[in-house]
Image (cartoon, coloured by chain):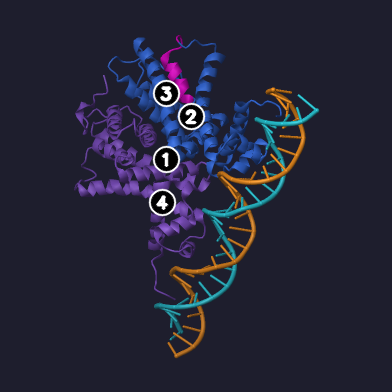
Chain colours: A purple, B blue, C orange, D cyan
DNA sequence: CGTTTTGCAATATGTTCATATTGTAAAAAC
DNA sequence: GTTTTTACAATATGAACATATTGCAAAACG
């Protein structure tokens, strides 16, 4: 047999091309042939690593999900931050910001995320990926909020788990608005909105631009 | 020429079939031939009333957008309510509820809405429809909140327009979560979430189940 | 060293698609 | 009552699609 190949790596390469294509032209424009072309390989190769197109889409959705986590981890590492040390508000703020289309990279990923969400409506397998991702995010968010509560940054009476879910709902909706009405919902307004929302949860002062002054 | 035909009516009939198809099988499964079949007409008829498929999709998106407004109007009329009389909190609560997949009818429409949003990412014409719809909703919501503020239901210092946008972002995200993770985000949790969110805006007591007690 | 297995390219297949073309019956217009 | 216009059906067209099939070179394995 020929060179021993890292299967997972090859699959990742193909999926990478798929995600690029989706970000640029939308999920409807994704076909096996186009993905192969975008990846610079033959259709046969794609078939060799993915039995069906659906299998490829499934891995792609998983991959996109992981990228948000990756970016948060990168933020922690690049800043030399310690997860247990960074204030909960900063952490939550950064986590939510990673879900917003605040630069080209994130805009691409939100575009792709939204495309997959829409397809999930009619494809149970994709909906399952969404559900799992959501639960994990709620869990992470809950942990962060609880730490903040223990540190006195958040009122004691708050229903933390519900709050986590609501913050994520707000984030997804805001990201969608920013993506589809970018003319009105600018990056600045997005950041302001996030900070204003955090002001409803945290009693501690915000990390962001202080001039936002949203509350009474 | 044959019977004089109400063009707008025929177009609406075709679009109705398209929306049904989209709700059931997703926007990717929508083709001109399938829409014609679902509407019980020939492909030729569809072509007669829509020059292109995109034109058909555009009208469909507009139609879905209007349905939310329609349902809110129906709520006002059926309850014999007067727009100027009903408390702002009730009105906003109802408006947000109409965006949630709380029954089959609304679930279908949220499904379709999400599908079109996703396509809007790669189709400027559809994004424009979204943007217009969003701005109109923000305006309506702003009006309602301002009335509430004048009536003392809402703190005076609040940035009303920002609040309106944030409420809508929350609503869209929550609707998406409820649709894709219906196993965890049940209708009950959705209603609770909406009420909890309203509790962050209104000082007046809520209309919903009082046991939600989200805040400190 | 030869056999076998693997990685992949090339191409075939049959379907579905959006749209174009053509045809025709019916009623409005004159 | 003839002419013209309209509403629609039927079918054609060519591209794009997901997937199946075939073939072959290379390297791992005995």
The x and y percentages for residue B103 are 55, 29
- Mark 1–mark 4 distance (CA, rounded to whole Å): 13 Å
From the viewer's side, name the closer residue of A140 and D7.
D7
Q: Is residue A134 left or right of residue D22?
A: left
Identify the secondary structure beneath mark 4: helix
According to the image, label 1 marks what residue?
B121
Q: Is residue D2 left or right of residue A45?
A: right
- Mark 4–mark 3 distance (CA, rounded to whole Å): 33 Å
- Mark 2–mark 4 distance (CA, rounded to whole Å): 31 Å
According to the image, label 2 marks what residue?
B100
The C terminus of chain A lies in which quarter of the figure? top left
Above or below, D19 relative to B61: below
The dot on residue B136 is 3
Image mark 4: chain: A
- Mark 2–mark 1 distance (CA, rounded to whole Å): 22 Å
What's the residue at 42%, 47% (across, down)? A25
Disc 4 residue crowd, few under 14, some 14–19, many 20+, Cα 10 Å: many
Q: Is residue A78 left or right of residue B79?
A: left
| First of labels 1, 3 by sequence position | 1
Which stretch is magenta?
B84-97
The x and y percentages for residue A132 are 43, 45
Can residue B216 be seen from the camera position used here? no
Give the mark toward the camera: 2 or 3. Answer: 3
From the viewer's side, name the closer residue of A156 and B208.
B208
- Mark 2–mark 3 distance (CA, rounded to whole Å): 18 Å
The x and y percentages for residue B191 are 46, 26
According to the image, label 4 marks what residue?
A21
From the viewer's side, name the closer residue of A43 and A56.
A43
Same chain check for tags 2 and 4 = no
């Amino acid at each position: 047999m020929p060179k021993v190949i890292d299967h997972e790596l090859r699959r990742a390469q193909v999926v990478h091309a798929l995600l690029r294509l989706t970000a640029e032209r939308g999920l409807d424009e994704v076909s096996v042939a186009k993905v192969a072309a975008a990846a610079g390989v033959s259709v046969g190769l794609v078939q060799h690593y993915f039995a069906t197109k659906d299998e490829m889409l499934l891995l792609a959705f998983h991959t996109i999900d992981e990228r948000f986590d990756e970016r948060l981890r990168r933020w922690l590492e690049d800043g030399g931050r310690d997860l247990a040390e960074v204030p909960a508000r900063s952490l939550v703020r950064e986590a939510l910001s990673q879900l917003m289309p605040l630069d080209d990279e994130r805009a691409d990923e939100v575009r792709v995320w939204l495309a997959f969400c829409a397809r999930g409506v009619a494809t149970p397998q994709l909906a399952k990926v969404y559900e799992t991702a959501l639960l994990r995010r709620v869990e992470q968010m809950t942990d962060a909020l609880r730490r903040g509560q223990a540190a006195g940054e958040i009122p004691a009476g708050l229903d933390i788990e519900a709050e986590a879910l609501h913050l994520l709902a707000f984030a997804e909706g805001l990201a969608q608005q920013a993506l589809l009405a970018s003319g009105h919902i600018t990056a600045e307004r997005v950041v302001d909105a996030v900070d204003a929302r955090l002001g409803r949860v945290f009693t501690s002062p915000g990390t962001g631009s202080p001039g936002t002054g949203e509350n009474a």
